[in-house]
């Protein structure tokens, strides 16, 4: 009797584990990456390395081209990762060629790539040492091609995929390496923090050597000219967790940018490990950033590290759509005296038009004596200076100038919507307006002196088509809510009710455009939910493709953000799960406020009522549990391998 019972229990346990494994490997959103295409046949011309070939016979150096090749541009070296191919450079290389052909573009990039013979550098540290020495020789060779240029480059941009990004940082520990040869490093899905699988003592030793140098005071002082960008792929990358890609406590904070591809403006997609090299959204914005760090006086990469950081933060963290973002600083804007003015006194209003025949300004009063202490403005306007503020006295109907707020706006999905949002909180005691500029989940405030005459002004230029603007003034206490999620055991006890009816429900009335739900108790990756926004009673409306609702999950301690867009009248859903656990220091500090909790932001269409449901997700929880077991095993393995 015992044998059949044991067999039954074993089958159940194996089935549960198999279910969790299937969820871990397959249960994530569809791949939202667009493909990059070559317009001509790609070519990989091999470069003769002469003496280097004796020491590294299995390695090679190539240059990417499509037809005519001109070696007078800006050199970039691509380093493949574990078992990677030199042909992975073609997406970045091809897009760079196309962008250089645009009118008024006076520079172009030469993409070089190392062929590492598909070495398993993620498993064997000896391969990393060889690759680092070989890449050093390649950099020296590349710079010789530009000896006769008018402004010869003194450095090479290095782009590394996976372990290739670690090799890029490993160059600086070579005793004979000139650190001025590299001032810009971009890494894709690189496990900077520690190895994914620590099977080899040499691998662990390489990590320790490289990271200890970059962390040291000596290293941080010597590397102030080097800017590093690291991107991780989110939940789709099951090989390298996003937490491993962060540069925290490795690269100096003023020289590092870490971002998840799910949070990068105008990307908002999760990339799997291989996809990170060809995902069109990420390739395009990476190339835009590279073009923006070119010094026009030399047509080479700028030596100004602060400027490069400003560019990288703009493209990878907080793109506000301003073409002059490098020089913009709360500009004073002269307003068109002939434009039409309209004062919008309503607490919530929507302005829509298929075409604007004459310029107009929409002014929203900020009354500090009202119960409303916050305002959100959501629009698809394409003019850079689309929002500002000024004082309009009671006896006047307009103002001649205003101060720009456009730099403090942020993009929202979908990708081609030009959808931007500005969210402000009015503080009635200090008579100041605090505007959330949300730089990759990092909150900052812009202090503006206001009076009873202060207005937010929205500029709508003539010729603008398909204009959609929504404004919502509200009391933050009513829209910033805190919900204590049930723990895993409570969800199991209440199953299946928690998975069908929901662990939490919230009814949202018409005209409520913004809600933020702080999810207290969501601190470990093992718990998982699904948020569903269900529209109800939507008005009949000829909605455009980009109209609808946006959900955003923000995890403050890891800067993880995920987005979901749903068109008008359709249900929107978003997985509520973590990749990185809540740091213990946050659990120990009892004085922290709700801002350190993960929170779900909802940007909703004003023509619908909504119902929010938080559903317990058993498949996600099983997959998250197995992933956490894997993470714990990684940590134990590293501790066991630590050298004496």
Image (cartoon, helix red, strand yellow):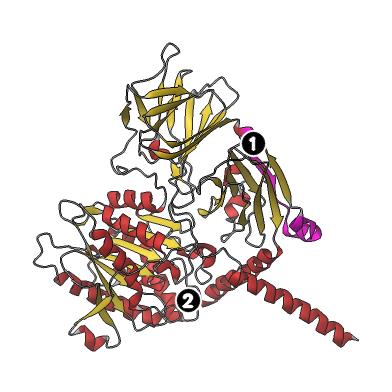
Residue at 21%, 73% (x, y): give it. Answer: 67
- For the residue carrying disc 1, how many other residues have a C-alpha within 10 Å: few (<14), some (14-19), or many (20+)? some
- For the residue carrying disc 2, how many other residues have a C-alpha within 10 Å: few (<14), some (14-19), or many (20+)? few
* Quarter of the view holding residue 121: bottom left
The kind of secondary structure element at disc 1 is loop
Disc 1 to disc 2, how far (Cα)?
62 Å
- Say the numbered circle drawn on residue 510: 1
Q: Position of residue 84 (x, y in %)?
A: 39, 78
Q: What's drawn in magenta, residue-wise?
A: 477-500
Residue at 31%, 55% (x, y): give it. Answer: 288
Q: Please state which of residues 561 and 179 is positioned toward the viewer in this rendering.
A: 561
Q: From the viewer's perspective, is 108 left or right of 446?
A: left
Q: Position of residue 610 (x, y in %)?
A: 66, 43
Q: Note whether 58 is above or below 530 in the view shown.
A: below
Quarter of the image with the N terminus is bottom right
**Does the magenta run of residues contain 543?**
no
Residue at 41%, 59% (x, y): give it. Answer: 281
**Residue at mark 2:** 643
Q: Note whether 569 is above or below 143 in the view shown.
A: above
């Amino acid at each position: 009797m015992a044998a059949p019972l044991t067999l039954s229990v074993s089958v159940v346990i194996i089935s549960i584990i198999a279910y969790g494994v299937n969820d871990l490997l397959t249960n994530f959103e569809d791949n939202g990456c667009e493909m990059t295409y070559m317009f001509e046949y790609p070519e990989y011309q091999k470069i003769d390395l002469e003496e280097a070939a004796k020491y590294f016979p299995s390695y090679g150096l190539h240059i990417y081209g499509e037809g005519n090749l001109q070696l007078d541009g800006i050199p970039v070296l691509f380093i493949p990762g574990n078992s990677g191919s030199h042909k992975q450079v073609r997406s970045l290389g091809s897009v760079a060629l196309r962008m250089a052909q645009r009118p008024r573009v006076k520079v172009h990039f030469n993409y070089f790539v190392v062929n590492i013979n598909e070495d398993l550098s993620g498993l064997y540290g000896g391969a990393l040492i060889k690759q680092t020495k070989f890449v050093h020789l390649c950099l020296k060779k590349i710079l010789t091609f530009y000896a006769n240029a008018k402004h010869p480059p003194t450095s090479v941009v290095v782009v590394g995929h996976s372990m290739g990004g670690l090799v890029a940082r490993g160059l600086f520990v070579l005793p004979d390496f000139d650190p001025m040869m590299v001032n810009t490093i971009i890494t894709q899905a690189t496990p900077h923090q520690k190895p994914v699988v620590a099977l080899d003592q040499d691998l662990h030793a390489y990590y320790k050597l490289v990271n200890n140098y970059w962390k040291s005071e000596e290293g941080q002082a010597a590397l102030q000219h080097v800017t590093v960008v690291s991107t991780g792929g989110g939940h789709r990358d099951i090989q390298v967790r996003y937490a491993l890609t962060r540069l925290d406590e490795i690269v100096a904070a003023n020289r590092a940018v870490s971002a998840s591809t799910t949070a990068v403006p105008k990307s908002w997609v999760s990339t799997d490990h291989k996809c990170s090299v060809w995902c069109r959204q990420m390739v395009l914005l990476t190339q835009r950033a590279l073009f923006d760090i070119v010094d026009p006086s030399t047509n080479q990469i700028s030596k100004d590290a602060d400027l490069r950081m400003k560019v990288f933060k703009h493209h990878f963290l907080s793109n506000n759509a301003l073409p002059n973002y490098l020089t913009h600083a709360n500009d004073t804007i002269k307003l068109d005296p002939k434009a039409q003015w309209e004062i919008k006194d309503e607490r919530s209003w929507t302005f829509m038009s298929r075409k604007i025949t004459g310029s107009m300004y929409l002014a929203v009063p900020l009354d500090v004596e009202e119960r409303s202490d916050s305002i959100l403005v959501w629009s698809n306007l394409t003019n850079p200076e689309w929002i500002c503020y000024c004082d309009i006295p009671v006896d006047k109907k307009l103002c001649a100038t205003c101060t720009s707020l456009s730099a403090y706006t942020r993009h929202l999905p979908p990708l081609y919507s030009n959808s931007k949002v500005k969210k402000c909180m009015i503080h009635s005691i200090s008579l100041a307006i605090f505007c959330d500029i949300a730089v990759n989940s990092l909150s900052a405030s812009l202090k503006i002196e206001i009076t009873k005459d202060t207005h937010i002004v929205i500029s709508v230029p003539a010729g603008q088509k398909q204009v959609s603007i929504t404004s919502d003034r509200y009391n933050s206490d009513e829209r910033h809510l805190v919900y204590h999620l049930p723990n895993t055991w409570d969800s199991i006890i209440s199953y299946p009710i928690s998975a069908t009816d929901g662990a939490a429900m919230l009814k949202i009335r018409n005209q409520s455009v913004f809600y933020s739900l702080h999810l207290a108790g969501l601190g470990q990756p093992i718990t998982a939910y699904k948020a569903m926004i269900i529209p109800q009673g939507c008005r009949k409306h000829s909605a455009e493709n980009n109209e609808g609702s946006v959900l955003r999950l923000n995890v403050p301690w890891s800067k993880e953000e995920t987005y979901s867009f749903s068109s008008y009248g359709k249900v929107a859903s978003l997985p509520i799960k973590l990749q990185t656990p809540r740091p213990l220091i946050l659990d120990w500090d009892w004085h922290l406020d709700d801002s350190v909790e993960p929170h779900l932001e909802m940007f909703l269409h004003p023509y619908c009522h909504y119902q929010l449901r938080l559903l317990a997700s058993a498949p996600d929880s099983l997959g998250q549990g197995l992933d956490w077991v894997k993470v714990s095993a990684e940590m134990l393995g590293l501790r066991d391998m630590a050298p004496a």
